[in-house]
Amino acid sequence: MNEPLTADVPAADKNAVIELPVIELRGVRKSFGGLEVLKGVDLTVTRGEVVVIIGPSGGGKSTLLRCVNLLEPITAGKVFLEGRDLTEPGVDLNEVRRQIGMVFQQFNLFPHLTALDNLTLAPRRLLRTPRTEAEQAARELLDRVGLADKAGSHPGQLSGGQQQRVAIARALMMAPHVMLFDEVTSALDPELVSEVLDVMRDLARSGMTMLCVTHEMGFARELGDRLVFVDGGVIAEQGRPADVLDEPSGERTRQFLRKVLR
Amino acid sequence: MPAWAGPVTRYVAEGLLTTVTLAAVSVVVSVLLGTALGALLTLPSRPVRIVVRAHVEIWRGLPIIVTLFFIFFVLPVIGLGFGTFVAAAIGLCLWGSANVAEIVRGAVQSVPRGQADAAAALGFPWPGRMRHVIFPQAARRVLPPLVGLVVNLVQQTSLAAVIGLLDVLQASQRSIERLTLSSGETHAVPILGSVLAVFFVICLPLTILSRRLERRLH
Ligand SMILES: Nc1ncnc2c1ncn2[C@@H]1O[C@H](COP(=O)(O)OP(=O)(O)OP(=O)(O)O)[C@@H](O)[C@H]1O
Ligand SMILES: [Mg+2]
């Protein structure tokens, strides 16, 4: 797991399929001024895997996610996307970020654009997709998240759950290789949580690689391939969700779960 | 109509034309230059920001009248002499553009950070984030304070009288003095009353527009 991964397939293994991890973090550290928020994080996410991140507030979960697409420049360590070192000088991060979808707690839809235009903006401007083609793809995705009738609505006219589903669809427009979710249901009224989780369940079942920060333990247990407990800037514990949730090995994990699960 | 009304009106009207021209030049240059400066203030480059910030703070911080005196009386000492109109226009544009810059910067920075994050996460480089996501949202927030500033700028043009520009105020004042000398009567009330009315007529619609825009935003 800690061996360096390269794209070259050794001659002897010519026929072996070496599947590079979609995301690999190696010794990632991140400081804000004097405050070290990530203190050396190693994490590998393979294709189709759903990794759920839990942990106490302020433990660095959001920061960790934002380091994956380098929305936060990291202080030390390396980030790989499908074997490519993103921390190398000369890497075009804007090009890289197209392949990493991200959904935020606060939705962050563009309020001056309709739902449809929120979806088509990036493909039209960045990929030069013709309008009709982009709009057709957008309508299909809106339909997939159950919002076919909201294409012409502005974010202000949509409920939180609807906005978040538009946000997921917007990220999917770029056909990302991996999706990052940062507490995407935390800002929602309880009765709206399930409509967003339904979309995420669909996505997970369709084989999308996902890295999700969430407090939804039910979701973690049902769909997570792996549960990662982040505390104090490090991965304090990880394993199969059922194992971690039912028999946490660390004292901090136990304490945290006792509080969350009550 | 008294006999003096005709010539005085013509004289003051010429002054009014100068005032309107000065106001128009100052508003146009201030908005264009100020928007550019304001955009520079939001650049990621720190040295650029520091230089522009210093420029903005100086011309925003000085009373306009001090700036006008400086341009008109001090610069000629180093060989940079300007006529009254150009000197007044330069002073007002420096003050106006510095204030517009501050309004533009404030509007850009009032767009929540999550908007730039979302655009960046989609793969937009910095100029694209600004152009497609931040500026369209900032533009709406810019309008009400910008119209307010335009009103202010129109009002401040009357300061040009102190360096001797024959604007509407100066023309009225000279008319009053001449009439007082020749006829012994002061006609300050009707003449200055008209000046007051003129400023009112120019500025009131703008003030109302600013209110409207502000209400529509909330
Ligand atoms: N831009 C920033 N500047 C300074 N400090 C920051 C910044 N972003 C995060 N921090 C700090 O980093 C620490 C970790 O923050 P982070 O948001 O990653 O935690 P989190 O685990 O996501 O918490 P929560 O569950 O509340 O979302 C906190 O102490 C926070 O104050
Ligand atoms: Mg967080």
Image (cartoon, rainbow, N blue to C red):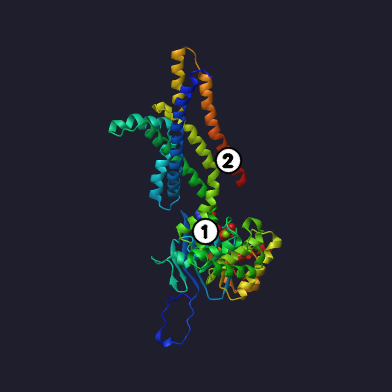
Q: How far apart are marks 2 and 1 (CA)?
A: 34 Å
Residue under the point 44% across and 45% down = B32
Q: Is residue A48 visible?
A: yes
Is disc 1's CB within 8 Å of ligand 1? no
Q: Which amino acid, mark 1?
A: Asp
Identify the residue position indicated by label 2 in the image.
B209
Chain holding disc 2:
B
Could you tell me which chain the residue with mark 1 belongs to?
Answer: B
Secondary structure category for the residue under label 2: helix
Above or below, comparing residue B212 to residue B18 in the picture: below
Element at label 1: helix
Quadrant position of residue B167: top left
Between B18 and A94, the one nearer to me in the picture: B18
Q: In this view, does B165 lie to the left or right of A227?
A: left
Q: Which residue is drawn at 45% across and 32% down?
A: B17
Task: Give the camera-side residue of A225 and A243.
Answer: A225
Residue situated in front as seen by the camera: B181 or B156: B181
Percent from the top left, x then y, of residue B189? Answer: 53, 20
The residue carrying mark 1 is B117
In the depicted structure, whether residue A62 falls above or below residue B180 = below
- N-terminal of the two: label 2 or label 1? 1
